Structure formats: structure tokens, C-alpha cells
Image (cartoon, rainbow, N blue to C red):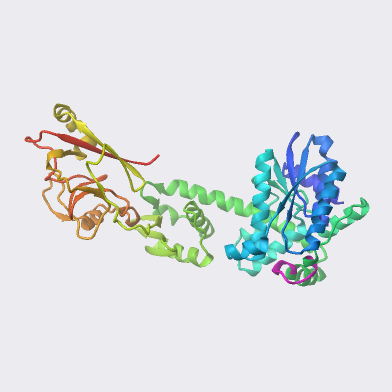
Amino acid sequence: MMYNKAYDTVRKYRMLSYGDSVVVGLSGGADSCALLDFLVSLRDELDLKISACHINHQLRGAEADRDEHFAETVCEKYDVRLYVLHADVAGEAVRQKKSTEQCGRDIRYEFFERTADMLGAKIATAHTASDNAETVLFNLARGSGAAGLCGIPPVRDNIIRPLIECTRSDIENYCRENALDYVTDSTNLTDEYTRNKIRLEVIPKLKEINPSFENAVSGMTERMMQTVDFINKSANDVLKRAETDRGYMISELKKADDAVLSQAIMIMCKKNNTSPEAKHIELIKKIVYNSGAVEIKQNVFAVSRQGFFRIAVRSNDSVSQQIKWNDRENISFNDKSISLCKINKDEFYDRRKNDKILSDNSLDSDTIPLSAVFRTRCAGDVFTPARRKVTKTVKKLFNELKIPQEQRDKIILLADGSEILWIEGIGVSEKNSVGSSTRNIVFISCTADG
């Protein structure tokens, strides 16, 4: 039963190809021992190169050492190389301020990935339909959305789970029929951890209602994954249509169905390394329709203004950093490169009518005082744009040009005190523009580093 289910799962999700290298996560329990035995049975058929990883979490004293020794014995039996990691999970959990469960999981997968990268291998973990049901219930109890109800994916990146459609009962029967030895983690027999409470108390009650509860959940999660994939594709299509240099057009976002808009918001947030909670998504949807701003986490905001939506990341850095304008020809400042180039006067006059960038960013270098510095904006900055002869604050100018708030602190200025001589992307001041009496011209260009 288990062999056939696992074999069908491998084929359905195209988990393995001929000649693959596979690293098996081997705890020594029934699930991982059954997985290793199953993959070894395919070794000749698919020319698989199989190895295994075992982590001694140092949480159960002599029992953990027993499990490590058992994993070594199993790998010798199958002629499989074993990689072992000793990790002080309890101490690391305290240092990282994580639960022991989460810290242990992070350490395991980091070790799996490191070993797989070294071997150019896929990672096979022994998650089962029973684990999947526990995960769904755990996520449901936390108020998860549709993505959480998809459970454990059969394939994620380079991780494969051949036993994901097999129940724990299937695994135990397979071990018994094939005389496979395995060890039992004593913590799995207690309700000390959240998942074990679900395993030992909740699922038995649900199986009284439906003995095939785990299989029912597997079917539900497969259908849910299809739904989520469709919503995700629709959300990406919406974002593609809505994206502009100024952000995402609110008029396009408003056309999206509610579920698609929620996923689009999630995608935009993740692009900025932010994972919003459900409450944030609901607040963000409101400002899409009504304008405003929502703080997702410190210094990260969702902003809906002037017909555009953006995820804004504000810097904590002060504007105390200043660089003298004439220190050198190439300056690195505020994650940007500033280049200063001397321009021949005759060349300037020949080109300026047809080259707006040249005209807007060329200064009479003799009018720039030695005290001038490159910096970002400060309160009280004033600017008189060339050919307009109207002095206004930089704040008012940015408002008139509808420059997004989160971009304003990144714009570079050439300033002498509060008097602004040049603004990146806007141009030069009247006082410092090139005129008939100009003898020396400097052209300023500014590009993002890299």
C-alpha cells in the first residue's frame, strides 16, 4: 500500500529523474526509515545517488545519541553515506529568541540545504499525510488564510516529499511488512509540544467522525493548492497591468476581485521583505479604495495617494552625512554614484537645445562656493529653478511635482547651507545655471550604485 502510494506520488509530481542525487532527512523514526528504504528500492531503476543527513539536537541526552548511532547502522546497511550535525538547539533557541521547535526546524533545513548544495542533490523529507493534516489544523487554529490551508507542499524548490500521500498507519504497516527497525522519539508520545497535542488529542476525535480523515485532508489541500495557484496567477496579472514607475495604478487594483487584491497586496509586501498579517491586508485594502497610509511594521508603509499605490520603506538614517562637491570626480553617496565632468563651453552651446539632460544638470562651476555639499533634503531648504526665477521651499516643490514621500529622502541635492544649487532629477538653480559670462562648466550625473 505505502510503496504504491509513494511511487504514484513520485510520478504525479515528477519528483525524481534518472540519475538524480538525493539527500534523505533521516531521524531514525519510522517515517524516515521507510522513506530511505523506498528510495533505495528505486536506486537501480533510476540510477539514484542516495545519501542521508541526521541531526543530533542534543535535547534528549542518551536517547539522542542512541538515535545517531541507529542512523549510522541503517546507512551502513544500505551502503548510504551519512552526514551528521551536532547542534545545541536549546541554547540556540534562547539566543535567537525562538521556540525550540522553530529553532530545531531552521537548523535542520539549513543543514539539509548546505549538504544538498555540496552534493548537487535534491532533499527528500519524510512528511506524511498525517503530518499534512496536523499542519492544516495547526494553521487553522492560528487563523491562517487559504495558503495555510494548502498544508505541506509535495514539492517546494529542491525539496521532495514522496510519502506526503501516505498515512502514518501506511508507514507502520510498511515497516512491519518489510521488517524495518526504527527508533521512537519519546517526545512524540507526550503533549508537551503544540503539534503533539493535535496529533494525540485532536486528530483521534476527528477520525471518530471520519476514519479516513487524513486522506480527506490530503484531497482538500490538493484542491486548495489549485485554487491558490489560480489566485496567485491572477494577482500577478493584475500587478503587471498596474505597474508604473510611480507605483501601481489604483484604478487597475480596484478592478480586482477581493481575493485577488488580497494576494496582490501580499505579493507587493513580500517584494519588500515584509509579511503582512491578515489585519494589515484588510487595512491596506481600505486605503486602496479611500487613499491613506498603513504602517505594516517599523519604517514600512503601504501608501495610497495621487492615484498610485506603493509599499514605502523609510530609512532611519539621518541626513548628517555630507560630501563636499569638489572633493573628487566620482563620489559614492546614499547608495548612488555621483560623477562630475568638465564640459567644453562650445560643445555645451552646440548640444544644449537638443539635450535637456545636459542643460538641466550643467552648472557654472565658478558660482559654486567651496562650502557646497552633496546631501539629502533638510527642513528650510529653498530653491530657485533656472528660467523660472521663483523661489520656493524644496518641500513645496516636491509636493507640486507629486514626488512620492518615500523617495524624497533619497533625492540628492547640492547645497550651500539652506540654499539649493542643484537637485537630482529636477535641475539647476537660476543662480548657478550656465550663462553668457560662464567660463567653466561642470556636468553632474547621478546613477544608482551597481
Quadrant in the picture for residue 220 = bottom right
In the image, residue 361 sits, relative to residue 305, either above or below, namely above
x 83%, y 42%: residue: 40
Q: Position of residue 147 (x, y in %)?
A: 61, 58
Q: Is residue 63 left or right of residue 272?
A: right
In the image, residue 289 sits, relative to residue 445, either above or below, namely below
Quadrant in the picture for residue 170 = bottom right
Quarter of the rendering occupied by the C terminus: top left
Q: Is residue 9 left or right of residue 77?
A: left
x 80%, y 70%: residue: 204
x 83%, y 51%: residue: 34
Q: Is residue 86 left or right of residue 31?
A: left
Q: Position of residue 431 (x, y in %)?
A: 11, 45
Region rendered in magenta: 188-196
Q: Position of residue 316 (x, y in %)?
A: 37, 59
Query: Is 192 included in the stretch rendered in magenta?
Result: yes
Q: Position of residue 281 (x, y in %)?
A: 49, 63
Q: Is residue 171 visible?
A: yes
Query: Is 398 included in the stretch rendered in magenta?
Result: no
Q: Is residue 167 visible?
A: no
